[in-house]
Image: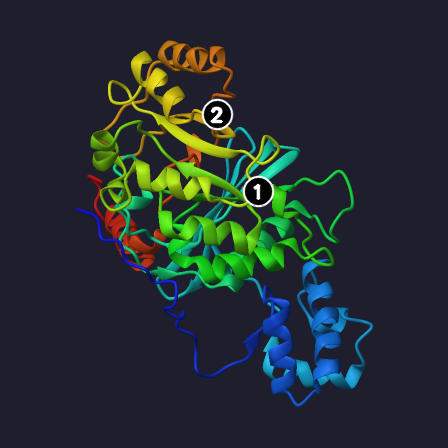
Amino acid sequence: MSTELDLSRRPAKTAETGPVNLSGLSLVKLRERMEELGIDKKKAKMRAKQISHWMHNFGVTDFDGMTNIAKDMRAKLEQNHIVARPEITEHKVSVDGTQKWLSKFGPGIEAESVFIPDVARSGALCVSSQVGCTLSCTFCHTGTQKMVRNLTAQEIVAQVLVARDTLQEWPTPSENRKLTNIVFMGMGEPLYNLDNVVEAIDTISDCEGISIGRRRITVSTAGVAPKIPELGARTNAMLAISLHATNDDLRDEIVPINKKYNLECLFDAIRSYPDLSNSKRVTFEYVMLKGVNDSLSEAVDLIKLLKGMPAKINLIPFNEWPGSPYKCSDWETIEAFAEVLNRAGLSAPIRTPRGRDIFAACGQLKSESVKKRASEALKEKLAKKEDPAG
């Protein structure tokens, strides 16, 4: 049985001493910080815009690079502030070009983000909104990780900055970008961290900073129905639904939040999402599980379920992980399922698995927060060296 816990208002623990990191902060938070330094409101707003522009458009990581800010002001900022990225515990590159970062935001606070090249207009970054997850979807590796805490808006934005650093995409390009889309499809349920997700989207979409438009930002939910219209009203982002079943009995089993918000409740909420149209369709994610949800009759049921809905279906071949209870549907089965949907006039692309070799594919993310401590791994390594039989 899953535990559905709304931690959206639980603050992240921060050190009581030490410099304040400004990198990734929203314009509102930056302005508040400037006012705390004694700068009057009008100048604080201007200063916040300057600092944000340097950090999020040019990618600078020190105050010396902020050349249109007076030296005495830069010196004042340096006394109690830094412009820093999170520690990267691990960075892996797949044979297909997919990249995965494990970012450490504090002791035991680690989250994964994944860059997938050559999708959408160019490349998409999958970001996490929580460390761990409370929903326990049975096909998802992240669901086996104990919930640690929500990520702050600053920590969500930091994942974008880290990717931009690696891609060497500073300053923000006006064209031919490598990173064009953001998807909230990493670790966690974004709608259980809605305030921070909204604030992060405001920063990511700021046209003078990172400048990724809201129509290129997609937020995926397993079905927190009451929060869906609010997400649309506050962000104007694209909506994705982690669906995976066409009836309540099966969805109760594989997406347990369905026991609280069933399909009727979920679809009522989706229909209330602002500005749905053929140009702003809902994406329905449907992971293909062998012998579970992949019959042609279920494809027909999916057509009925989505009738009248501006929709696109992403068919996702199941990505296996250690101990997973499912197998991926046969490719012929997936193609036949897609063909039924296509003949009904629905867009149903089959998502090409990416990053499987580095466990960066859909449903495979699980942070090092719950894996062996480095000290334990080192002890085991030394023990093997000392044991000739090892």
User: Which mark, by number, is residue 275?
Assistant: 1
Quarter of the image holding residue 251?
top left
Whole-percent x, y for residue 158 in the image: 55, 58
Residue for badge 2:
351
Q: How far apart are marks 1 and 2 (CA)?
A: 26 Å
User: Which-is-in-front pick, marks 1 and 2?
Assistant: 1
Can you see residue 159? no
Q: Regarding mark 1 in the picture, which secondary structure is present there?
A: loop
Whole-percent x, y for residue 259 in the image: 22, 42
What type is the residue that disc 1 sits on? Asp
Against 191, residue 356 (above or below) is above
- In the foreground, 331 or 360: 331
Quarter of the image holding residue 107?
bottom left
**Mark 1 surroundings: few (<14), some (14-19) or many (≥20) residues within 10 A:** few
Quarter of the image holding residue 6?
bottom left
Residue found 79% across the figure and 76% down from its top: 69
